Image (tube, rainbow, N blue to C red):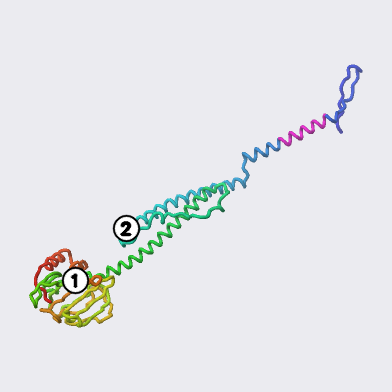
Amino acid sequence: MSKVKYYYDSETLSYRKIEKKKRRTLKFVSVFILASALFGFLTVFITSQYIESPKEKALKRELSNMQLQYELLNRKMDEAQLVLEDIANRDNNIYRLYFEANPIPDEQRKAGFGGVNRYKYLEGFDNSKLIIESSKRLDILQKQIVVQSKSLDEIAKLAEEKEKLLAAIPAIQPVRNEDLTRMASGYGMRNDPFTKVRKMHWGMDFTAPRGTPVYASGDGVVTRADSNSAGYGKHIRIDHGYGYVSLYAHLYKYNVRKNQKVKRGDLIGFVGNTGRSEAPHLHYEIFKDEQRINPINFYYGSLSPQEFNELLEKANLENQSLD
């Protein structure tokens, strides 16, 4: 039960009851409600602005972690780019140069992606710029790796061909030094042993006893092992590929047959004195693209520098040939 309040009326000299006014009460109630609402709004606003909820804290940590991961990714791409540039530099200036292949231009190695916007689906987010730039770098890096991979595949193929070429080139002396009596005559103008007239001698003559082993000077296929070529007597021809052919003449007998594959250093025949020959010796010729060339330039695979210089000196003497 609510308390009744009185006041003293000096005019009537008596106590009078205090009557409550409804309008005033309503005003107080309205002010109280408005103040409460304002206080609640301010509380919610301040809380939302300065106090994070557990969910917001979790999302903020996740976003921070994502940004860190993208920064680490970009650092790794920087390192990968440096390594790839070093490989590309070696590829252009060492590998491709050695194998006589054209360098790959930078425009081809570092080309981007033209045409449509490949990253439209990544737009509209708070960190879209970071994500798009990282995605672009990664795509370009992957493209450069593909270009370099194809280049290395080409280099590997060229290396295989180069290895075959090096094995095929006639690169050793067909008769061992210890088996030689002497190097009788070299490539060039020489006196013919039968007519005594100066004429071109198209090969090198190695004097050795009858039956001395003769070796293939490079990998190849025997195309002839017969005596059907005038003046050469029993002779062997080996096709080494790449335009090289070697010829071994005046043999005593064969150790190979036509169409047989041989390796450098294989025993193919024996020194003899057949055909147009004055004494037992091996007449040796090299053809390149069907043209005779000086065999003296092809002994790097079996002679030391000193032995080569001695052979060169003897080969240059204008003496009499043996065939």
Residue 59 percent coordinates (x, y): 59, 48
Horizontally, is 77 left or right of 187 in the view?
right
Quadrant that contains the N terminus: top right
Residue 90 percent coordinates (x, y): 34, 56
Label 1 secondary element: loop
First-in-chain label (2 vs 1): 2
Which picture quadrant has residue 22?
top right
Q: Compared to 196, does 141 lie above or below?
A: above
The residue positioned 89% from the left and 19% from the top of the image is: 9
Q: Compared to 16, does 34 lie above or below?
A: below
Which picture quadrant has residue 165?
bottom left
Looking at the rendering, the stretch of residues picked out in magenta corresponds to 24-38
Disc 2 and disc 1 in contact, CB within 8 angstroms: no
Residue 279 percent coordinates (x, y): 10, 79
The residue nearer to you, when weighing 44 against 291, is 291
Does residue 28 appear anywhere in the picture?
yes
Which picture quadrant has residue 227?
bottom left
- Mostly what secondary structure, the magenta segment? helix
Which residue type carries mark 2? Ile
